[in-house]
Image: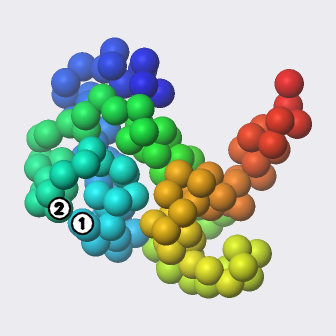
Amino acid sequence: MQQEYANLSLEDRQALTRAIINLLDSWGIPDRDQVQMLCLPEGTPVRAIRQYRHDKPFPDDPALLERVEHIVGIADALRTTYPSNPAMGPIWIRRRVRRLRGRTPLSIMLEDGLNGLVQVRSHLDCSYAWHHSGSVR
């Protein structure tokens, strides 16, 4: 994703950034947790999220862009899982899931970092999990 992001126009990078922040907002994730979930560079103030909502694009940072890719994958999987009820995504994110050891997907994504994002995405998207496990060559 990093190469693709670097090739985007400023306007497209701004639009992608706004879309990701809007998605995290729709999930009800507070700004301080968005900073953590996105793994924004060290020292990024919480108020930076406000700038990302408007016109500041995300930095071209490999760790951040990898997380964005997983967040998009999770959002796509939620749309597929609940095609007739888009309000279920934010609800599901906050519910304890037995297959996730009784934890909420949100707590996993925040507390376990990149591994947590991969775990949640793998739980929701069996084709990603199958590919990620190395079953596809």
* Amino acid type at mark 1: Asp
Q: Which residue bears the numbered disc 1? A: 31
Q: Is residue 105 above or below residue 76?
A: below
Element marked by disc 1: helix
Say which residue appears at 78% left-offset and 38% top-offset: 131
Quote the CA–CA distance across marks 1 and 2: 6 Å
Tell me the crowding category of disc 1: few under 14, some 14 to 19, or many 20 or more residues within 10 angstroms, Cα based: some
Tag 2: amino acid: Val
Label 1–label 2 contact, CB within 8 A? yes
User: N-terminal of the two: label 1 or label 2?
Assistant: 1
Rate crowding at label 2 as few (under 14), some (14 to 19) or many (20 or more) other CA atoms within 10 Å.
some
Residue displayed at 43% across by 44% down: 68
x 62%, y 61%: residue: 120
Q: Which mark is residue 46?
A: 2
Instruction: Kindly identify the residue that appears in the image at 30 percent across and 29 percent down.
Output: 60
Foreground residue, 11 or 32? 32
Numbered mark located on residue 43 in the image: none
Rendering coords of residue 124 (x, y %): 68, 60
Asked if residue 16 lies left or right of residue 71, the reply is left
The spot of residue 34 in percent (x, y) is: 32, 61
The quadrant of the image that shows the C terminus is top right
SS state under label 2 = loop
Percent across and percent down for residue 33 are 33, 67
